[in-house]
Amino acid sequence: MTDLTKLKIAEARDALRKGDVTSVELTEACLSAIDAADALGAFVHKTPEIALEQAKAADARNSADAPALNGIPLGIKDLFCTKGVPSQAASGILEGFRPEYESTVTSQLFADGAVMLGKLNMDEFAMGSSNETSVYGNAVNPWKVDDRQLTPGGSSGGSASAVAADLCLGATGTDTGGSIRQPAAFTGITGIKPTYGRCSRWGIVAFASSLDQAGPMTKDVRDAAIMLTSMCGHDPKDSTSADLAVPDFEAALTGDIKGKTIGIPKEYRMEGSPTEIEKLWSDGADMLRDAGAKVVDISLPHTKYALPAYYVIAPAEASSNLARYDGVRFGHRASLEAGDGITEMYEKTRAEGFGHEVQRRVMVGTYVLSAGFYDAYYNRARKVRALIKRDFDQVFADGVDAILTPATPSAAFGLGEMAEADPIQMYLNDVFTVTVNLAGLPGISVPTGLDAQGLPLGLQLIGRPWEEGDLLNIAYRLEQSAGFVAKPSQWW
Amino acid sequence: MLDLTYEAPQPKTIAGATGDWELVIGLEVHAQVATKAKLFSGASTQFGAEPNSNVAFVDAGMPGMLPVINEGCVAQAVRTGLGLKAEINLWSAFDRKNYFYPDLPQGYQISQLYHPIVGEGEVLVDMAPGIARRVRIERIHLEQDAGKSIHDMDPHMSFVDLNRTGVALMEIVSRPDIRGPEEAAAYVGKLRQIMRYLGTCDGNMQNGNLRADVNVSVCRPGDYERYQETQDFSHLGTRCEIKNMNSMRFIQMAIDYEARRQIALLEDGKEVVQETRLYDPDKNETRSMRSKEEAHDYRYFPDPDLLPLEIEQAWVDDIAASLPELPDEKKARFVTEFGLSEYDAGVLTAEVANAAYFEKVAEGRDGKLAANWVINELFGRLKKEDHSIEDSPVSPEQLGKIVGLITKGDISGKIAKDLFEIIYTEGGDPEAIVEERGMKQVTDTGAIEAAVDEVIAANPAQVEKAQQNPKLAGWFVGQVMKATGGKANPAAVNKLVQEKLGL
């Protein structure tokens, strides 16, 4: 079989079960592809020995009713703690850190037979929208316009790049404000952030605890459903994990969306939005209508406050979550001079270990939680958050099953292009996605078209809480209608 | 409910150059919750383990680790709240208190600033029979303890022991209702007593399982009453907080020193600066640790890793139903049921084990006599040998039998002391020993009569004197007792002596 790496998870599963291919063959193919793709900067730590060992074990276990992920080679975002394997959240401060524990999500994937190819690049501590804040350097989008290198988006940029370039069959991502959905849209793949509480956060390096969720990044919706089924589930080690049964999400993919109501929020129509994005969006609405859904205009009136509220809450939580990186117990510790005390150790260690964007957010977060500013910023942002959630509750109560929006305000931009820009320009990438995290809802990004330069664009569907099955099915229908099959041509 | 009535004690006054001053004191008591596991991890809380051996990943602040509340700690906090007659909040929440320190691995302490689990309660602090101070409890919240930094093991390095990191503490916050150093110590003692009754804190101050931050201010007579009337703190002086006191004696000494320091400042026309101070027992003084301006900004905010803590009334009711009889009720009952003085009842109820011991001794017997024997003989003897009631060589059953033998008139009080000594050192059944060793009082008048006759016959000169001065009859009683080896019933001897001498 040729081009094994181009297989989707569902295809590989069927081939493995039938014995047409072995996991070792699949894994070796992926490992070669990875070795040939260093230019993409997707994998920051390769684990071929672990991968081959897991692949052999998967082959030994193989049967016609083996778990769906048995023998499937995946990439793991560096934010996940993987036992004995460097897990640095792409930060210098976690230099040399190899956890003695395995995150719940990766444990579940491996328990279902998945194979780990290595750790994937990301923005440092998941803070960024372009994968340019990583200590490992940029991840690069396999899509390219002429000689211009593009961002794969962020923070799960390595995951997006690896999946889009067929280096692995699927990857884990995490999404705090859009970190799965935006890179998925920039690279022409599918990414879903489930309802907050669906996936355990245990063992995932925390960015903003009330917003962080893990999710899969895959080549299509079916694969997302397969991976998500394995990743979800109640975990008593995470107090915010929901004690709910996990359905077989793949079984929900009927493609039948007749009678479903799709909301189009008017507040997501941004002034100065590219006409291509507007067209992509209205085309998507038409596709769903043609498939038998009812498309209605809706209003989410507090949308415009979401981005500022997000950039108060997320840094506030991050400033506290990142306090543990102090050089005392693990990771980087600055070398000290005679006379330096504990304060100097903290200051030098954190100044050396954290990149600029992380430092900026820690400072913003510290500021908004400070005495005298807490009510004006953090508390007000929490109130806004409650209003945003109420907007969604209202729309769902009115009978809307899912909400359709653009995933990003533009296609992928060039690496380095935003270097001189105001950080807020970068934050605007999250304008369509942060509301979903603030409200704790499931959201999925599906590629539905190309822009004039031939770069992929995605649409986002937002679902009711805990209704990932329904959301995936609507996304599946949209995917079928859009028929997006474009692939980047291999230049790396 | 049996309730004793109390009057409030007089506040302590300190005479200054410009007149009298009074003290106003509030305490934050940190009590380590008696549980096997930490507040948010399964690591052990055992004291004295090898450094850094009782540490879960979450206690060490490892990346991606998450806290999960230990239900046992919540139950203990509720139990303590109920023991302090406090309101239990069915909805409470955890907040992060952020600051950097090497023994605080997460970089924040998980605490309950905004919504504590226990609300307002009350403690009656006994000062003397009939005198007690009612101290209002403002709140009790659950929080994590920090680890221990060790700076004196190496000239260039500091070491950290995380065994205590994350152990559950209850912070019990009082209103400023305490009016003197002795009251402050008695308040801590009363909390300790109640928590030991409840089994929610072992109260071991030496191991740091019970510590207090003491807030002290001074004011003029009358100001405090104005505060109580209005609850307006502006009537009170500026307070200083003395941190981390773990001895009753030092609490008193620190308060006394601190009050006098503040008075001296005020009388010099200076101001008391609100600040945190440390007490140095070697020098008996308090020193500034940090001023209000240098105070940390802890940036409290709700911990997003934890859901609000919701408990059910039925669960609280179950805990309430399992509460033991508490010290105040027990003491009142001992006074009414056994006819004890409040003082003796207080001594016997100081520790629940003592009270239980006493009740076994007193069961079906003379309560007062039982109390005397427990307090004077048993406690005295145990103290001399540094024994606790739990390892008393004399069981309550044995002591009960001794008391019973006295009441029945089988042995005199003097013989009883000998018997107690035998039981204490050799053990055995008191009743059997009395029989075997012929310790029983002679109540047979014939035998006593013979002894009396013998003494009278042998001492004719004394007989004459006694007949002129009846007060001397006691000499004959003494001689007869001596002759009978102390076993004669003294009352019977006395009666016969009087008769024979014709008095």
Image: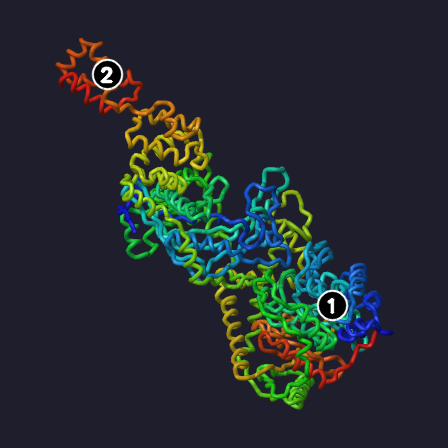
State whether residue B501 is above or below residue A266: above
Q: Quadrant of residue A7?
A: bottom right
Q: CA distance from mark 1 to mark 2?
A: 113 Å
Could you tell me if residue A475 is visible in this image? yes
Identify residue for label 1.
A158
Relative horizontal placement of residue A93, taking residue B478 as reference (left or right):
right
- State which chain disc 1 sits on: A
Q: Chain of mark 2?
A: B
Task: Locate residue B496 relative to residue A97 in the image: left or right.
Answer: left
- The amino acid beneath tag 2 is Ala
Question: Which residue is at 80% across, 60% downward?
Answer: A53
Q: Element type at marker 1?
A: helix
Q: What residue does disc 2 label? A: B450
B114 over B190 or under it: above or below: below
Q: Is residue A235 above or below residue B195?
A: below
Judge whether B378 appears above or below B107 on screen.
above
Badge 2: residue crowd in 10 Å (few <14, some 14–19, many ≥20): few
Q: Amino acid at mark 1?
A: Gly
Quadrant for residue A187, please give it.
bottom right
Quarter holding residue B255: top left
Front-most of residues B144 and A231: A231
Q: Between residues B4 and A458, which one lies in front from this camera angle?
A: B4
Instruction: Residue A226 in the image: state x and y as whole percent.
Output: 70, 73
Q: Is residue A261 left or right of residue A218?
A: left
Position in image of residue B294 (x %, y %): 49, 51
Helix, strand or loop at label 2? It is helix
Across and down, in percent, residue B440 comes to 32, 25
Residue B10 in sight here: no
Q: Say which residue appears at 77% left-offset and 68% top-offset.
A: A72
The label nearer to you, 1 versus 2, is 2
